[in-house]
Image: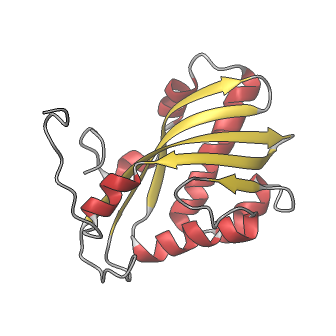
Amino acid sequence: MAGRIPPFTIEDFTLSPEKRAEICDGLTERQTFMVNQWMDLHVQLNKGNWDAFDVFFDTDKMTYDNPNRPDLGKFEEWVTSPMALYDTFPPSAYRTLKAWGKGDDEICVLCHHHGKHTGGPYMGVQPTGNQLDVLWFSWIKFEGDKIVHIYSISDVLSMLIDLEVIEAPQPVDPYK
């Protein structure tokens, strides 16, 4: 399993008002709004409600950067990824674990994506039933109430190992 995610249940992906307040502790009112927009987006992603995206994104301006997915630059390209993940890794659940803010238009979030490889092939590997647990950081820029840019970096190596796409022995001490 990716990183060191403490034990969890699928119910942990429904963030209570208290958990949301804990995640936003120390943020300004505006930063809290942006983080809550992000967490509200996860609620819709977890339902597969693609029609709700207009609430969260300026779809004409939104851009996406991720060194692992250079093919997903514009909104129309990026949106295909959560849709495919939803079908390939049900229950495909997202949650925010931590959040930071800068000014009135930027946040950074640490997130967790969970699912099981049961819905279809991934990178040529037929469904294995293996659990998917990916941690990632996103830097998110807003204009007004809408997301206009996301830069994400995720633990793709652990994901590919967990999904049996690649084998990678992990050394205890790589310098020996």
Q: Nearer the viewer, residue 15 or 38?
A: 38
Quadrant for residue 60, please give it. bottom right
Colouring scheme, one of rainbow, by chain, secondary structure, one colour: secondary structure
Residue 149 place in picture, x, y as percent: 74, 48
What residue is drawn where x is 28% and y is 45%?
8
> How many numbered marks have been drawn onto this rendered protein structure?
0
Residue drawn at (60%, 16%), measured in percent from left and top? 26
Q: Is residue 132 left or right of residue 136?
A: left
Residue 15 place in picture, x, y as percent? 48, 42
Residue 88 is drawn in which quadrant?
A: bottom left
Specify whether residue 69 is in view.
yes
Position of residue 106 relative to residue 89, above or below, is above
Q: Nearer the viewer, residue 156 or 148?
A: 156
* Residue 10 position (above or below residue 99): below
Tell me the quarter of the picture where residue 109 sits. top right
Which percent across, then down, holds residue 127?
29, 80
**In the image, what residue occupies the spot 13% across and 37% down?**
172
Q: Which is nearer the eye, 106 or 176?
A: 176
Residue 95, x across and y down, in percent? 48, 47
Mark yes or no: residue 15 visible. no
Is 123 situated above or below 2? below
Question: Looking at this rendering, what residue extends furthest in the top direction?
Answer: 26
Observer-nearest of 48 and 130: 130
Q: Quadrant of the C terminus?
A: top left
Q: Residue at x 57, y 47 (%)?
A: 152
Identity of the residue furthest to the front in this view: 176
Residue 140 lies left or right of residue 161; in this view the side is: right
